[in-house]
Image: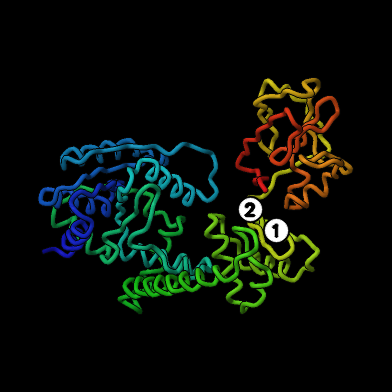
Amino acid sequence: MDLLAEAVTTFVRTHGPDQKYLLAYSGGLDSHVLLHLFATLRSIDSFHLRAMYVNHGISSHADKWAEHCRAICRELHVEFIQQTIRQTSELSNLEERLRRERYQLFQDNLFVNEILLTAHHQNDQAETILLQLCRGAGLPGLAAMPRMKVFGKGFHARPLLDMTRDDLHHYATRHELNWIEDESNANRFHTRNFLRHEVIPILAKHWPSVTKTLARAAENCADAQEFMNISTHYLLTKVQGTVSGTLSVKKIRELAAIEQRHVLRAFIHQANFLLPSTVKIQQILQTLLQARDDKMPHVFWGNAEIRRCRDDLFLMRKMGQHDPDQVIPWDISEPLIIPDIGTLEACSFLAHSGHVTVQFRKGGEKLRLSGRKHHHELKKAFQMWGVLPWLRDRIPLVYADGVLVAVVGYWIQEGCIIQLQPNADFATVTP
């Protein structure tokens, strides 16, 4: 049996006959070979196969290529899907932007537990690890492309990752496949094309097996990263803070410097935030770990920030701008949207139904807690409720005829019911 056919047969039979596949099909040599392999095997093993073409809107030939892909799928009796990436005048990082949007379309079209198939091979893996080396990537980047990973509602697999570009070309020639030659593949301006046409051929003159060697290096890095993940997960369980979802400053200080960096990266990664640079990681550790216990330092990057309160480190979405001096009139018959805070909705308002405003803490506010004879300062109530210091000036205070009747999420005057529906930029105020 042909090596490529054997690889695909083993892959399909590993995942069972009832598996569904969505194949990324550009019409180029690589994806055409993958499509032909799966379509051929489907005549023996019954499984559901779809092919999807993404029109990037860059080449003037894109529509013609789409029709070519449609015709090939019709010939192979494969369901065909076409999607188009929206046009934009933004040219910076075009290659990366198109890649992100292409995969977003694949994710949007994926069924539950369906496997996205891409035709990445050993040469692609070598290019990826060289690219990551030039970017100064760590182990996750040098692990390059995995054979299989969770992706959207399903998975993403690369069944041909052990095969070379020559292997695919020989298969396509032997089976007389008619593939598309994208003129952009010869453009050395694109990073991958530069590595493919300029760098790797030079390396191959001295090390003929360089692509295989680099792919093996990627496998080794992937193994090391997996071991690191296991070790870091164990460390994360050891440094949990007093509040759920936080880390303890005292416990992190007891770790070695390298363990501190890995724990912090894992903490950020598991929260699905963009990982900061090495310099920023060091800044976070120095700023948050070395501050006195009565300080509340914070460091932000991208759309994320880490704040410290006493012994706990809190990771959250970066808070937007907020004016604590604003006074917002509220017609309680309608929801009130407060930018960067949330949406207020009055289910009922039985007391103080006159002029209603929403304000924020300025100092000196008082309220009478349930079961208490005397008024309490709002400042002390916040402390008693455990409201984090950076949220205290962002908690909406509802006034009716100048009288404080609600601290949203914590206290309401008898006869007044207020609901807060938080938006994505608002940290929860539930004690």
Q: Mark 1 is on which residue type? A: Arg
Q: Residue furthest right?
A: 364
State left or right for residue 310 relative to residue 179. Answer: right
Compare residues 122 and 315 and report the one nearer the observer. 315
**Residue 263, how many percent across, how many down?**
57, 69
Q: Quadrant of residue 66?
A: top left
Q: Secondary structure at mark 2?
A: strand
User: Would residue 261 be found to the left or right of residue 11 on screen?
Assistant: right
Q: Mark 2 sits on what residue?
A: 316
Residue bearing the label numbered 1: 307
Tell me which residue sits at (27%, 54%) in the image.
30
Q: In which quadrant of the rendered image does the N terminus lie?
A: bottom left
Residue at 32% in and 43% down: 111
Q: CA distance from mark 2 to mark 1?
A: 8 Å
Say if mark 2 contacts mark 1, CB within 8 Å: yes
- Residue 380 appears left or right of 11: right
Q: Position of residue 298 (x, y in %)?
A: 72, 59
Mark 1 neighbour density, 10 Å: few (under 14) some (14–19) many (20 or more): some
Q: Earlier in the sequence, mark 2 or mark 1?
A: 1
